[in-house]
Amino acid sequence: MSYRPTHADFNALFRGKVYGNYDIFTARSYADFVRRNDVDLERAISLFDEQLIGTIVFAQRSERAWLSLMGVRPELRGQGYGKRLFGAAVDAVIAAGARSIEFEVVQRNAAAIAMYRGFGFTPVDELFVWSRKAQRGGSSDLRFGRMSESRIRSLVHAPPTCWQRDPVAIARATPLALIQVEGAYAFLRMRGENGVLVDAGARDIATAHALVAEMDRQAACDLTLLNEPASSPLSAAMREAGWRIAERQHRMMRT
Protein backbone atom coordinates (compact mmCIF):
# COMPACT_ATOMS: atom_id res chain seq x y z
CA MET A 1 0.00 0.00 0.00
CA SER A 2 1.06 3.62 -0.56
CA TYR A 3 2.14 5.27 2.68
CA ARG A 4 4.25 8.34 3.47
CA PRO A 5 6.30 7.44 6.57
CA THR A 6 6.67 10.14 9.20
CA HIS A 7 9.44 11.10 11.59
CA ALA A 8 7.52 9.33 14.35
CA ASP A 9 7.55 6.10 12.34
CA PHE A 10 11.33 6.10 12.04
CA ASN A 11 11.78 7.10 15.66
CA ALA A 12 9.80 3.97 16.59
CA LEU A 13 11.46 1.68 14.02
CA PHE A 14 15.04 2.69 14.86
CA ARG A 15 15.10 1.15 18.31
CA GLY A 16 17.14 -1.62 19.86
CA LYS A 17 20.69 -2.70 20.60
CA VAL A 18 22.18 -1.19 17.43
CA TYR A 19 20.54 2.25 17.44
CA GLY A 20 19.60 2.75 21.08
CA ASN A 21 16.31 4.05 22.40
CA TYR A 22 16.32 7.73 21.55
CA ASP A 23 14.59 9.67 18.79
CA ILE A 24 16.62 10.24 15.64
CA PHE A 25 14.32 12.92 14.18
CA THR A 26 12.09 15.80 15.10
CA ALA A 27 9.37 16.78 12.66
CA ARG A 28 11.57 19.68 11.53
CA SER A 29 14.80 17.73 11.12
CA TYR A 30 13.00 14.97 9.21
CA ALA A 31 11.44 17.45 6.78
CA ASP A 32 14.88 19.01 6.28
CA PHE A 33 16.47 15.59 5.72
CA VAL A 34 13.87 14.70 3.09
CA ARG A 35 14.18 18.04 1.29
CA ARG A 36 17.97 18.25 1.24
CA ASN A 37 18.49 14.72 0.02
CA ASP A 38 15.65 14.44 -2.52
CA VAL A 39 13.99 11.61 -0.60
CA ASP A 40 10.74 10.79 -2.41
CA LEU A 41 8.22 9.81 0.26
CA GLU A 42 5.65 9.01 -2.43
CA ARG A 43 7.86 6.07 -3.47
CA ALA A 44 8.34 4.72 0.06
CA ILE A 45 7.79 0.98 0.41
CA SER A 46 6.00 -0.19 3.56
CA LEU A 47 4.68 -3.41 5.09
CA PHE A 48 1.69 -3.58 7.42
CA ASP A 49 -0.22 -6.01 9.59
CA GLU A 50 -2.60 -4.11 11.87
CA GLN A 51 0.13 -1.51 12.19
CA LEU A 52 3.33 -0.56 10.39
CA ILE A 53 5.80 -3.45 10.27
CA GLY A 54 8.59 -1.60 8.50
CA THR A 55 9.40 0.84 5.75
CA ILE A 56 12.21 2.00 3.47
CA VAL A 57 12.65 5.36 1.74
CA PHE A 58 15.09 6.28 -0.99
CA ALA A 59 16.21 9.02 -3.35
CA GLN A 60 17.22 9.09 -6.99
CA ARG A 61 19.02 11.60 -9.19
CA SER A 62 19.06 10.40 -12.76
CA GLU A 63 21.04 7.12 -12.82
CA ARG A 64 22.27 7.42 -9.23
CA ALA A 65 20.14 6.16 -6.31
CA TRP A 66 20.53 6.29 -2.53
CA LEU A 67 18.73 3.91 -0.19
CA SER A 68 18.17 6.22 2.72
CA LEU A 69 16.35 4.82 5.76
CA MET A 70 15.01 1.36 6.47
CA GLY A 71 13.48 0.19 9.71
CA VAL A 72 11.53 -2.81 11.01
CA ARG A 73 9.72 -3.00 14.34
CA PRO A 74 12.18 -4.40 16.88
CA GLU A 75 9.98 -7.35 17.90
CA LEU A 76 9.61 -8.45 14.25
CA ARG A 77 13.23 -8.39 13.19
CA GLY A 78 14.86 -11.55 11.93
CA GLN A 79 11.73 -12.70 10.12
CA GLY A 80 12.68 -11.56 6.63
CA TYR A 81 10.79 -8.25 6.52
CA GLY A 82 13.93 -6.18 6.06
CA LYS A 83 15.03 -8.40 3.18
CA ARG A 84 11.64 -7.94 1.49
CA LEU A 85 11.76 -4.16 1.89
CA PHE A 86 15.35 -3.84 0.73
CA GLY A 87 14.85 -6.07 -2.30
CA ALA A 88 11.73 -4.15 -3.33
CA ALA A 89 13.62 -0.84 -3.08
CA VAL A 90 16.52 -2.13 -5.19
CA ASP A 91 14.05 -3.37 -7.80
CA ALA A 92 12.22 -0.02 -7.78
CA VAL A 93 15.27 2.16 -8.42
CA ILE A 94 16.63 -0.18 -11.09
CA ALA A 95 13.25 -0.12 -12.84
CA ALA A 96 13.43 3.69 -12.71
CA GLY A 97 16.82 3.71 -14.47
CA ALA A 98 19.36 3.64 -11.62
CA ARG A 99 22.76 2.27 -12.60
CA SER A 100 24.52 3.19 -9.35
CA ILE A 101 23.01 2.37 -5.93
CA GLU A 102 24.59 3.35 -2.63
CA PHE A 103 23.86 3.73 1.07
CA GLU A 104 25.58 3.87 4.45
CA VAL A 105 25.27 1.38 7.30
CA VAL A 106 26.71 1.50 10.82
CA GLN A 107 29.43 -1.09 11.26
CA ARG A 108 27.76 -2.41 14.41
CA ASN A 109 24.81 -3.68 12.38
CA ALA A 110 26.38 -6.99 11.37
CA ALA A 111 23.05 -8.68 10.56
CA ALA A 112 22.07 -5.94 8.11
CA ILE A 113 25.49 -5.95 6.44
CA ALA A 114 25.24 -9.71 5.90
CA MET A 115 21.81 -9.24 4.33
CA TYR A 116 23.08 -6.46 2.02
CA ARG A 117 25.96 -8.67 0.89
CA GLY A 118 23.39 -11.22 -0.23
CA PHE A 119 22.13 -8.64 -2.73
CA GLY A 120 25.65 -8.06 -4.10
CA PHE A 121 26.50 -4.95 -2.06
CA THR A 122 29.93 -4.61 -0.47
CA PRO A 123 31.74 -1.90 1.53
CA VAL A 124 33.63 0.51 -0.72
CA ASP A 125 34.71 2.98 1.96
CA GLU A 126 34.86 3.36 5.72
CA LEU A 127 33.27 6.59 6.96
CA PHE A 128 33.68 8.24 10.37
CA VAL A 129 31.44 10.71 12.14
CA TRP A 130 33.87 13.03 13.96
CA SER A 131 33.00 15.32 16.87
CA ARG A 132 34.70 17.69 19.25
CA LYS A 133 33.55 19.86 22.14
CA ALA A 134 33.52 23.65 22.06
CA GLN A 135 36.97 25.20 22.21
CA ARG A 136 37.92 28.01 24.55
CA GLY A 137 39.05 31.15 22.83
CA GLY A 138 37.15 30.65 19.57
CA SER A 139 35.81 33.87 18.15
CA SER A 140 32.45 32.63 16.76
CA ASP A 141 32.54 35.51 14.25
CA LEU A 142 31.32 33.44 11.32
CA ARG A 143 29.12 34.92 8.61
CA PHE A 144 26.17 32.78 7.52
CA GLY A 145 24.18 33.05 4.32
CA ARG A 146 23.09 31.32 1.14
CA MET A 147 25.61 29.67 -1.12
CA SER A 148 24.88 28.52 -4.66
CA GLU A 149 25.51 25.00 -5.87
CA SER A 150 27.89 26.35 -8.53
CA ARG A 151 29.91 28.19 -5.89
CA ILE A 152 30.11 25.06 -3.77
CA ARG A 153 31.23 22.98 -6.74
CA SER A 154 34.01 25.48 -7.41
CA LEU A 155 35.37 24.94 -3.89
CA VAL A 156 35.19 21.18 -3.36
CA HIS A 157 38.27 19.14 -4.18
CA ALA A 158 36.89 15.73 -5.09
CA PRO A 159 33.68 13.86 -5.87
CA PRO A 160 31.38 13.73 -2.82
CA THR A 161 32.21 11.06 -0.25
CA CYS A 162 28.53 10.17 0.09
CA TRP A 163 25.05 11.26 -1.02
CA GLN A 164 24.53 13.64 1.90
CA ARG A 165 27.70 15.56 1.02
CA ASP A 166 26.81 16.15 -2.61
CA PRO A 167 26.88 19.89 -3.56
CA VAL A 168 23.13 19.68 -4.27
CA ALA A 169 22.45 18.78 -0.63
CA ILE A 170 25.03 21.24 0.74
CA ALA A 171 23.47 24.17 -1.13
CA ARG A 172 20.12 23.39 0.49
CA ALA A 173 21.57 23.47 4.00
CA THR A 174 21.25 27.23 4.30
CA PRO A 175 22.33 29.34 6.01
CA LEU A 176 25.94 28.21 5.69
CA ALA A 177 29.28 29.61 6.79
CA LEU A 178 32.47 28.87 4.87
CA ILE A 179 35.65 28.19 6.82
CA GLN A 180 38.58 28.17 4.42
CA VAL A 181 42.35 28.04 4.28
CA GLU A 182 44.59 27.55 1.26
CA GLY A 183 43.89 24.02 0.03
CA ALA A 184 41.06 23.18 2.45
CA TYR A 185 37.46 24.17 3.22
CA ALA A 186 34.51 23.39 5.48
CA PHE A 187 30.83 24.29 5.20
CA LEU A 188 29.28 24.88 8.62
CA ARG A 189 25.61 24.78 9.54
CA MET A 190 24.27 25.55 13.01
CA ARG A 191 21.73 23.37 14.83
CA GLY A 192 20.88 25.43 17.88
CA GLU A 193 24.18 25.95 19.68
CA ASN A 194 25.89 23.03 17.91
CA GLY A 195 27.70 23.16 14.59
CA VAL A 196 27.44 20.52 11.85
CA LEU A 197 30.06 20.44 9.12
CA VAL A 198 27.95 19.33 6.17
CA ASP A 199 31.08 18.93 4.05
CA ALA A 200 34.82 19.51 4.37
CA GLY A 201 37.93 18.63 2.45
CA ALA A 202 41.68 19.09 2.49
CA ARG A 203 44.31 18.68 -0.21
CA ASP A 204 46.86 17.02 2.09
CA ILE A 205 47.74 16.53 5.75
CA ALA A 206 49.31 19.99 6.11
CA THR A 207 46.21 21.80 4.83
CA ALA A 208 44.03 19.49 6.93
CA HIS A 209 45.88 20.55 10.09
CA ALA A 210 45.56 24.20 9.06
CA LEU A 211 41.81 23.77 8.55
CA VAL A 212 41.32 22.10 11.93
CA ALA A 213 43.18 24.99 13.58
CA GLU A 214 41.08 27.54 11.67
CA MET A 215 37.89 25.79 12.77
CA ASP A 216 39.09 26.05 16.37
CA ARG A 217 39.73 29.76 15.83
CA GLN A 218 36.44 30.61 14.14
CA ALA A 219 33.93 28.11 15.57
CA ALA A 220 33.82 28.01 19.35
CA CYS A 221 30.78 25.69 19.38
CA ASP A 222 30.58 21.91 19.53
CA LEU A 223 31.34 20.53 16.06
CA THR A 224 30.42 17.37 14.18
CA LEU A 225 31.67 16.28 10.76
CA LEU A 226 29.50 13.67 9.05
CA ASN A 227 30.73 10.74 6.97
CA GLU A 228 34.42 11.54 6.53
CA PRO A 229 36.50 8.80 4.86
CA ALA A 230 38.72 7.06 7.40
CA SER A 231 41.70 7.32 5.06
CA SER A 232 41.42 11.07 4.37
CA PRO A 233 43.88 13.77 5.49
CA LEU A 234 41.10 15.33 7.57
CA SER A 235 40.52 12.12 9.51
CA ALA A 236 44.24 11.96 10.30
CA ALA A 237 44.34 15.61 11.39
CA MET A 238 41.21 15.33 13.53
CA ARG A 239 42.52 12.24 15.26
CA GLU A 240 45.77 14.03 16.08
CA ALA A 241 43.83 17.08 17.32
CA GLY A 242 41.79 14.98 19.76
CA TRP A 243 38.49 14.77 17.90
CA ARG A 244 36.35 11.75 18.82
CA ILE A 245 34.91 9.13 16.47
CA ALA A 246 31.19 9.23 17.28
CA GLU A 247 30.19 6.58 14.71
CA ARG A 248 31.79 4.21 12.22
CA GLN A 249 29.97 3.38 9.00
CA HIS A 250 30.46 1.53 5.76
CA ARG A 251 29.53 3.07 2.44
CA MET A 252 27.96 0.22 0.50
CA MET A 253 27.65 -0.18 -3.26
CA ARG A 254 26.82 -3.04 -5.59
CA THR A 255 29.94 -4.42 -7.27
Image (tube, grey):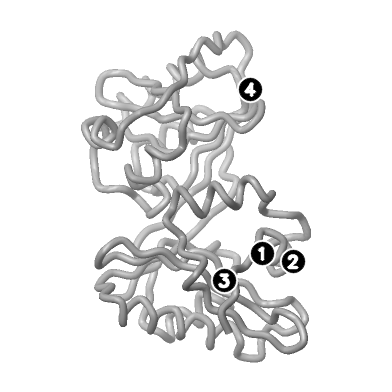
Q: Residues within 10 Å of mark 4 (few under 14, many from 20)?
A: some
Q: CA distance from mark 2 to mark 4?
A: 31 Å
The residue at 59%/69% (across/down) is 4
Q: Determine the secondary structure under disc 4.
A: loop
Question: Number of marks in the image?
Answer: 4
The residue at 57%/71% (across/down) is 70
Tell me whether circle 4 and circle 3 mark residues in contact (CB < 8 Å): no
* Percent position of residue 148, x then y: 31, 32
* Percent position of residue 24, x then y: 67, 54
Q: Which residue is mark 1?
A: 10
Tell me the mark number nearer the camera, choosing from 4 and 1: 1
Q: Which residue is mark 3?
A: 70
Q: Is residue 234 above or below residue 118?
A: above
Q: Residues within 10 Å of mark 1 (few under 14, many from 20)?
A: many
Numbered tag placed on residue 134 in the rendering: 4
Q: Which residue is mark 2?
A: 12
Q: CA distance from mark 2 to mark 3?
A: 12 Å
In primary-sequence order, the first of circles 2 and 3 is: 2
Q: CA distance from mark 4 to mark 3?
A: 33 Å
Quarter of the image for residue 191 reads: top right
Tell me whether circle 2 and circle 3 mark residues in contact (CB < 8 Å): no
In primary-sequence order, the first of circles 4 and 1 is: 1
